Amino acid sequence: MTTASARTRPTAAIGSMLALMCLAGLAGCTGAPMTTASTGLAPGLVAEINSPGAQMDRQSALSIVNQYRALRGAAPLAADPSLDAQAQALATQYASSGNAPSRPADAAALRLSAGYSNFADTFSGWRNSPADADVMAQGDARRVGFAAVYDPSSAYGTHWVMLMGR
């Protein structure tokens, strides 16, 4: 066994987390409702954000993104209220126009998604896309803001933004 493979061999805890993440992804693909009982995920990750006034659980989102970053060897991100506000403005723009907003010049990265009704499904979509997965593990990012906006007149309903800063 090489040193590199020894460093990347998952521990039992990481293996359990990966299994839960896979289960969540499968539940999302089958159309089965995601509940904390069926997935083992935090309630904030499976909370439906597909009604007016629904709010996402930013702390739960940060927790699962940081768990993923740890798996990829990246430092954890810190919550940033100013990035939350920027992400909220971008998500509102995205939902009302239907057009993907551009990454702000001072941001390290921007991830967008639309159509998922909870953060667990949104995260799974990003994690399963190689380009999005690499961005979530981007090493120079240190801060993050999250937002979700539901617009019943939009073709996609719920619009998600993750804005990362240095």
Image: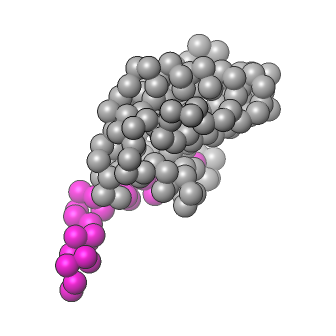
In the image, 103 versus 163, the foreground residue is 103
Specify the principal SS of the magenta part. Answer: helix
Dividing the picture into quadrants, the one containing residue 57 is top left
Boundaries of the magenta span: 1-28
In the image, 74 versus 26, the foreground residue is 74
Q: Residue at x 32, y 33 (%)?
A: 78
Q: Name the residue furthest top.
A: 53
In the image, 154 versus 29, the foreground residue is 154
Residue 116 visible: no
Q: Is residue 130 left or right of residue 83?
A: right
Residue 121's spot in the image, x, y percent? 55, 44
Assign the N terminus to one quadrant of the image. bottom left
In the image, 139 versus 21, the foreground residue is 139
Residue 122 visible: yes
The answer to whether residue 68 is above or below residue 89 is below
Q: Residue at x 38, y 47 (%)?
A: 140
Dividing the picture into quadrants, the one containing residue 105 is top right
Q: Residue at x 41, y 52 (%)?
A: 137
Assign the C terminus to one quadrant of the image. top left
The answer to whether residue 148 is above or below residue 42 is above
Residue 16's spot in the image, x, y percent? 30, 57
Q: Is residue 126 left or right of residue 142?
A: right
